[in-house]
Image (cartoon, grey):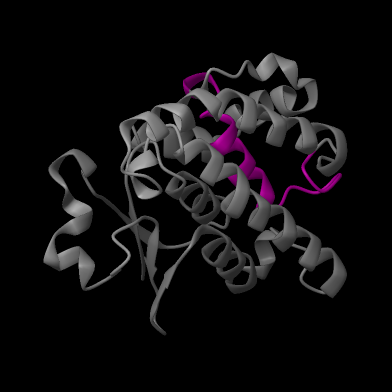
Amino acid sequence: MLKLFYALNTCALASHIALEEANAQYEAVRLDFRANDQSKPEYLAINPKARVPALITEQGILTETPAILAYIAQTFPEARLAPLADPYAFARIQAFNSYLCSTVHVAHAHGRRGYRWADDPVAIKDMQRKVPETVGACFELIEREMFTGPWVTGGDYSICDPYLFTISGWLKGDSVDIARFPRVHDHYTRMSARAAVKKVLAVQS
């Protein structure tokens, strides 16, 4: 059975939703970041990066949200979470999820984990001040150029959708009004109504 390690208010929510959408048999294990569970030897033996998500599979351990989402889509093809028969379309999905991971998430993290990039309190404060601008710019690009609609890549729900939903949920905390982005806002509302999302959010509360 698959085992997903997650923590509240993290990007692991996307993988958790995807597992539920795929009707996968899995166990979800919550880490408490306030208790520093991610840095305890038991978890470091699973993921030396001390981050979530981590997914234990029969073949080994996977980390990084885009990789886990792709694995779920490919392992459960009947769920139709990605256009697996079309290399170009699948690459576009990977490109979108990679942008969320490498750019949008990093812009968000500057507001909460500036210590990863600087020691100077003034520099950290400046990074925090910049977050509404940088995160807002990321979502302006998504809204204008990257979001096809009604789902991220068009008419078919995919592994992009729980990931965008997860990061869209951070906008308020980043002092960015989601209403600035009507299509993203509509997407977030429709995602919130999905049965799999409701089930996972009930667990992650």
The magenta region covers 151-173
Q: Closer to the camera, 42 or 106?
A: 106
Q: Is residue 204 above or below residue 179?
A: below
Q: Is residue 2 left or right of residue 129?
A: left
* Res 76 quadrant in image: bottom right
* Res 83 quadrant in image: bottom right
Residue 203 magenta-highlighted: no
The answer to whether any part of residue 86 appears in the image is: no
Q: Closer to the camera, 30 or 22?
A: 30
Q: Is residue 129 above or below residue 146?
A: above
Q: Is residue 194 left or right of residue 204?
A: right
Question: Residue 110: image x %, image y %?
Answer: 46, 38
Question: Residue 101: image x %, image y %?
Answer: 57, 52
Q: Is residue 137 left or right of residue 11?
A: right
* Res 102 quadrant in image: bottom right
- What's the residue at 24%, 49% (across, down)? 31
Question: Residue 81: image x %, image y %?
Answer: 69, 58
The answer to whether any part of residue 189 appears in the image is: yes
Q: Quadrant of the N terminus?
A: bottom left
Q: Is residue 152 above or below residue 40?
A: above
Question: Residue 38: image x %, image y %?
Answer: 23, 55
